[in-house]
Amino acid sequence: MGSGFDEREKGMEAKWAHDEDLRFRAIARRNKLLAHWALEQMGLTGPEAEGYAKSLLDLEVRGAADEDIVQQIRTDFAARSIIRSEHLIRTTMNELGIEATHQVMNETKA
């Protein structure tokens, strides 16, 4: 016979798993949006753009932190003589993070 404590513990575990899933999906969405922003800044299209977006998203899969992603974008911009401040990249990342979270939350409501 399960106790109220066991039921509450299972509920908390389920909520934690759900929250982690939403967080992961929001970060993945943010990074995809950020990759598209970077592509626009660099004027990349077609297969080159697809390859770049995939390489940026692969950083996340390999466990890269936000800092690593920002530095990769800065390096890629510098290689193309595109001047964008680290502050702009971070601000864009934060804004896209908010947008991505809203998108993911709206998907779960539908």
Image: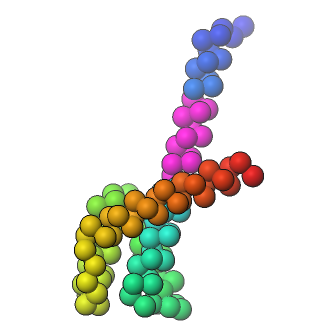
Of residues 44 and 7, the one drawn nearer to the viewer in this rendering: 44
- Percent across and percent down for residue 12 are 57, 26
Question: In which quadrant of the rendered view does residue 6 lie?
Answer: top right
Can residue 100 be seen at all in this image of the molecule? yes
Residue at the (41%, 72%) spot, across then down = 56
Task: Give the quadrant of residue 60.
Answer: bottom left
Q: Residue 78 lies in magenta, yes or no?
A: no
Q: Residue at x 40, y 59 (%)?
A: 94
Q: Is residue 90 above or below residue 48?
A: above
Colour scheme of the rendered structure: rainbow
Was residue 20 drawn as part of the magenta stretch in this picture? yes
Q: Quadrant of residue 40?
A: bottom left
Residue 25 or 54: which is nearer the viewer? 25
At x 48%, y 56%, the residue is: 98
State which quarter of the image contains the N terminus.
top right
Tell me how many marks there are: 0
How far across and down, in percent of the image, does residue 8 sit? 61, 18
**Residue at the right extreme, as displayed:** 110
Q: Main secondary structure of the magenta part?
A: helix
Percent of width and height locating residue 44: 45, 90
Residue 82 picture location, percent across and down = 28, 87
Magenta stretch, residue numbers: 13-25
